[in-house]
Every structure is written in structure tokens, then in C-alpha cells.
Amino acid sequence: MIKELNHVSIRTGDMEKALHFYVDILGAKIIRDASSPDGKGRYVYVQLVDGVIEIIKGKPGADNLGLQHVAFLISDDTDLQTVHKQLVDMGYHFTVEPKAASSGDGYLAFFEDTSGAIFELIQRKENIRIPGLKNPHLEEFDHISIRVTDQSYQKCEDFYLKTLGFEVRRIL
């Protein structure tokens, strides 16, 4: 079902300050700078080694700044409509139903996991990453951590391991 962790999305009230941090300080490379079809939104994708962060233009001082979602690219042999139906049948709530991506490349949908975290599912052919990108400061974009309550831990573990097909990675 899931091919990869595609990107994490962060909303900022100051796009230029955010880009200065990621590009000038952390050494990220801008791989896509796009606007929404209505011209009001701006989305800049930066790559740190093999990891991608989508920086979304928000309003300064808004309540919804910070981490917005984690995006998963679904497997090439999987259809977004099929994944959507499976998750809906399992009782998951979609905040955005499957629709064409504003980039014009593929389809996307947003849903909440059992802890209330927002996730994007993407079906597309284009790989926006630069293969083998080196960074003077970072060796690896290792993982994303989500903290859940004790009460929802088992449901979350089942969701990621059984539903999405993730594997536990042990680092010694």
C-alpha cells in the first residue's frame, strides 16, 4: 500500500525566514516552488539529503502554524481510490476526499489516524527528489516521531504495521 514517506508539511507565517533557515542554515535545496491555482497559496519543497519538507505559506500569527501533515506516496501498483475505500471501510475519517493534485501530477487525499494526526496519501508518477543529494551538515533525514496516548497506542501500532504495511526498524 505505502511506497514511501514522501514529505512532511510545515506551515510558516514567514516564508522567507523559513527558507533562510532550511536553505542557508541547514543546507537544504529547493526542489519545487509552486503556487496554488488561485495564486493565494505558496508551497516550497526543500530536500535535506533524501528527506523532503513542504513549506506552506500561512498568515503571520495564525493558530495553524507548524507541522501540518505527513505525506505517504502509495505504491505504484495501488490506486488511491482503492486505498481510500479500504480505509473508509475500516472507519477512518477523510478530511479531504481523493481529488486531482493542484500540481497537476496525480491525486491526493487527507485523513486522520487513530491519534488525530493528519496524513496525506499521494498517487503520482513524478519523483521530485534529487537522487544522491549531499548536504554539508546532515547525513540522513532519519524519521518522523508522533507521540500518542497510552489508550491509542495499540490502535496506532495496528494501523501502521497491519493496515499500512510498515515495518519496525531497530537501531542498535
Image (cartoon, grey):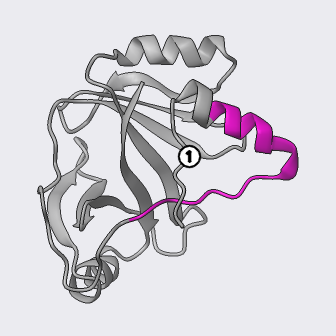
The picture quadrant where one finds residue 115 is: top right
Say which of 102 and 24 sits in front: 24
Q: Residue furthest front?
A: 172
Residue located at (87% from left, 44% from top): 151
x, y percent for residue 38: 25, 43
- Relative to 15, residue 67 above or below: above
Q: Residue 149 magenta-drawn?
A: yes
- Relative to 103, residue 11 above or below: below
Q: Which residues are magenta?
A: 142-159
Residue located at (69% from left, 39% from top): 157
> Could you say whether the residue bearing mark 1 is in a helix, strand or loop?
loop
Say which of 21 and 64 sits in front: 21
Q: Which residue is mark 1?
A: 168
Q: Residue 124 magenta-drawn?
A: no
Left of 110 or right of it: where is 16?
left
Residue located at (45% from left, 38% from top): 120
x, y percent for residue 12: 42, 70
Three-letter code for the amino acid on which mark 1 is drawn: Val
Q: Quadrant of the C terminus?
A: bottom right
Q: Residue furthest right?
A: 151
- Relative to 40, residue 139 above or below: below
Q: Quadrant of the N terminus?
A: top left
x, y percent for residue 46: 24, 65
Say which of 8 and 94 sits in front: 8
Task: Please rate how many residues cluster around mark 1, counting C-alpha atoms within 10 Å: few if below 14, some from 14 to 19, many from 20.
Answer: few
The image shows a total of numbered marks equal to 1
x, y percent for residue 147: 70, 58
